[in-house]
Amino acid sequence: MKNPFISMRKGFRKLTGTISGMFRSKYTEIILAVGLFILLDTGVLIINFYTSYQIANDAHAIQIASRMGTMSETLLHQLYQVHQDLIEPDKNYPATIDKLAATYKTFDETLDAFIYGGELIGVGQGKDALLKDTVYRDTSATFLTDAEEIWKQYRVELKPIVYSYFNDIEKEDLIKATQEAIVYSRAHSGELLKLMQSFSLAVEGVAQRKAERLRMIQSAGITLAVINFFLILFHFLRRLKQSDILVERSRKETENILKNVNEGLFLLDRDFVIGSQHSASLNVLFEKEKLAGENFINLLSRLVSEKTLESVKEYTEILFSPRVNESLITDLNPLDQVEVNLNSEGTVFNTRYFSFQFSRVQEKKGFESLLVTVKDITEEVKLAEQLKAANEKAGREIDMLLTIIHLDNGLLNDFLQTTGDGLNEVNVILKSPAKEGERAEQKLQPIGRIIHKLKGDSTAIGLDFLVDKFHRFELEINKLKERDNISGENFLPLVVALKQLIADFLVIDKLKEKMNGLDLSVLEHQRRSAQNGESEPAEYDLRWIEPMKNLVAKVAKDCGKEAVLDLSQFDPALLSDSQFGPVRDIIVQSLRNAVTHGLETPGDRSSAGKSPQGRLEVALQRDGERLQLTVRDDGRGIDMEQIRTAAVSKKLVSSEQAVTMDRSKLLSLLFAPGFSTADEAGIHAGQGVGMDLVKDRVLALNGKIKLRTQKGNFTEFQYLLAHESLTVN
């Protein structure tokens, strides 16, 4: 959404250009003076920081040099202690030598750092800084050189003692070495102490000179800063009068901005009264000439609902409360996006979308008014709706792609072919005029049969988004069946639903083409088979086994049941290409019927002493010159009285006829159009189309149907694909 102040900023461009021009021409001296002041202060700060860093480093050097003087004395004392521990029995002289070695190492590293530069790392160094060798050699070259000469020989005397652990020296030799080192230390430790003290004083002198130089720089900087301040003040006073003129000019330009800004701007007081100054666009937005002094609530009352109006009152009252943080209640704005209906030309209402933004105006007495910005966001709202629709469409296409990408290519091609043919057939039926003597409602039966078949096919391959749309199509058909005197206009909902189905079908077809023929489902199936040590599946396995298993799993889950499908006796290789489609329709509808009507829920099965998981069997075998297709379930069986009651309820037979019907005739009603024993229509049952479709496909294959059932135990449909007769046993 655009910033509500963008247009206002554009209006201020002229004012900004004028001010910038004055700064470039009249305030050049002030700008230069301010820049010089900043540059001067920055330079002084940098020098101050650098010199302070050097002084701090010198302080470290002084401290270390003083400590080195005492270390020369410490070395002598530690030599005495080593010698004493060596000549006395049972003394732990290695520990004493370790202390001597630590002092020796510290003194040696520190002296090298002073002479050659380096970072001090070791026992007792603490936070000692990196020592700059050039400074200390130039300052105190004689002291350091003399100290180094003494230490060279001193180091020779101490090494046999310090490294005795590694050299495996005899105790007598070690005693002799300590005596020689003590003699040398007595002769030179005092001189070494004086040299390091002199070096410390020399470094201290360097630090003092740096501190004096820093004070001079600071004094000069402060003096120049004061001079620069008075220069700035002089120029400021000289330009003050000209600034007053600029302010007056700016006020006039602000008035011009209010006349040309695109948003509605006005002030609102505690009594909801609009201020005297507002943008000219406010009149255009509200289509009203005079708005200054009008009550804002009265203005809104003809545009928004009473509930929204009350929310506006509560929100503005909260904004005027000084105890409430404004940023915390921004989301509560009831007018952030509001639909308004403007009465154009007296009778025609123009629907627009406005956005009202409220900001507190800080005054001496607190918050006495609010700055209100009104913007027409109609185009943004429409664009957002279009974007949402586009995103939803893209989301549907992604869902479709993620679904079909895992399907077998041959299975998907068959589905697209049969679905396309079915939708075209429905389209032809809807478009064709009723034949002479044919009623409009007679179109519903063939349409319902086709849609029910396509819903079953979609369920079998897992296209749930299509299953739902086919089901909604069936609900529209059921609504029409309940109407009297149906005309062509009543079929409009079916036309709209069919249009959407065709659109989704075309999207799926295009997505398939974009897959460039890469059959990902086969590759994935082969990969899983290879991992499990299985051989490559045959094509009929992908086109039959998986869809049937998916269908049973989906329908059982939706119905709250459990089912397992046995296909051990199913041999699809017995079918010809022409039999593939009809037999598939028979199996799909029979399995749906078996799960929804035949199987009991896990609880009911357990109460009846059965396994909670129902069992379904599909067998396809050769029986002489015929094919025998069998679909069997171990469910509740068929309740004859339930069929009798449902037939009367569906008005297929009268009550008197139902009483006299024998078992064979009652069972034949299962295949009658519109018959179902379900109490109400659901996504998988209750449409009265499934078994009617089965009968149609069996007859198309010149077959017949045998039905065996035992209440509480099983139901078995046998489809003998050879003869046209229909027998029921």
Image (tube, grey):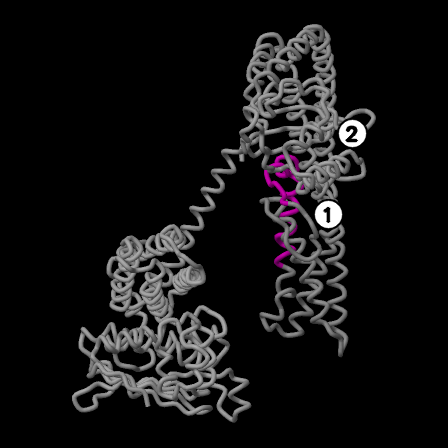
Q: Are marks 2 and 1 in contact (CB under 8 Å)?
A: no
Query: According to the image, label 2 marks what residue?
Result: 367
Task: Answer few, some or many: residues within 10 Å of disc 1's Cα (few below 14, many 20 plus, some between 14 and 19).
Answer: some
Q: Percent from the top left, x then y, of residue 683?
A: 44, 68
Please tell me which residue lies in front, 258 or 3: 258
Q: Classify residue 649 as left or right of residue 728.
A: right
Dot 2: what SS? strand
Residue at 77% over, 69% down: 84
Please tell me which residue lies in front, 40 or 611: 611
Query: According to the image, label 1 marks what residue?
Result: 191
| Amino acid type, callout 1 | Glu
Residue placed farthest to the right in the image? 365
Q: Relative to residue 680, is residue 74 depicted above or below?
A: above
Marking on residue 721: none
Residue at 45% over, 62% down: 482
Task: Answer few, some or many: residues within 10 Å of disc 2's Cα (few below 14, many 20 plus, some between 14 and 19).
Answer: some
| Amino acid type, callout 2 | Phe
Q: Classify residue 424 as left or right of residue 279.
A: left
Q: Nearer the viewer, mark 2 or mark 1?
A: 2
Residue at 32% over, 67% down: 407
Q: Percent from the top left, x then y, of residue 389?
A: 45, 46
Residue 167 drawn in magenta: no
Residue placed farthest to the left in the image? 625
Please report whichever mark, 2 or 1, sits nearer to the chain's N-terminal start: 1
Q: Quadrant of the N terminus?
A: top right
Magenta stretch bounds: 130-156
Q: Quadrant of the C terminus?
A: bottom left
Secondary structure, magenta segment, majority class? helix
Q: CA distance from mark 2 to mark 1?
A: 81 Å
Q: Percent from the top left, x then y, of residue 345?
A: 54, 24
Dot 1: what SS? helix
